[in-house]
Amino acid sequence: MADGNGAETVTFKYKFVEEYNPKYVNGAYGGIGPQGELIINFFLERQPIPKEVIHKLQPDGKLGDPVSQVPDNLKSQVIRFIETGVTMNLESAKRVLAWLTEKVELLESREKKANG
């Protein structure tokens, strides 16, 4: 296709599956896979939630303080919930890196303007 100035153009149309549901992530884990591709698994890092908590009951039937929980070592754990990941070749990784760099610089510029 040609634009109004005679230059060739191409149009990308974006289609979303019905199940499309963006996710919040605050970290990533991955590396280079056996096929030489970049593998990135995105995760949400959070504190664990116990499977069970046992509370005392007060004489009047009200809920008292917790006395134990399962598992009992939650304070020494962090959950990294991985729901999605991507695999890409070197050229795709370079394009994504350039795109991310551009967007990060834009956000930093906006933040700098907002903070005077």
Image (cartoon, rainbow, N blue to C red):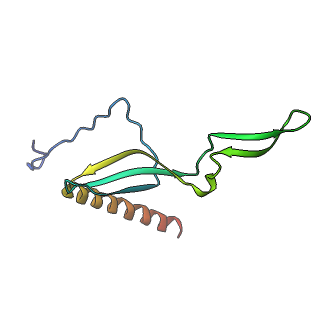
Outermost bottom residue: 116
78 with respect to 58 (left or right)? left
| Quadrant placement of the N terminus | top left
Q: Nearer the viewer, residue 4 or 63?
A: 63
110 with respect to 1 (left or right)? right
Where is residue 35 shown, x and y percent of the image? 19, 53
Q: Nearer the viewer, residue 67 or 24?
A: 67
Tell me the residue at 27%/38% (across/down): 14
Where is residue 82 shown, x and y percent of the image? 43, 46
Tell me the residue at 29%/60% (across/down): 97
Outermost right residue: 60
Residue 98 in the image: above or below residue 64 = below
Where is residue 26 shown, x and y percent of the image? 47, 54
The picture quadrant where one finds residue 110 is bottom left
Where is residue 91 shown, x and y percent of the image? 19, 57
Tell me the residue at 62%/46% (across/down): 71
The picture quadrant where one finds residue 10 is top left
22 with respect to 93 (left or right)? right
Q: Nearer the viewer, residue 2 or 44?
A: 44
93 with respect to 3 (left or right)? right
The number of discs equals 0
Residue 64 in the image: above or below residue 45 = above
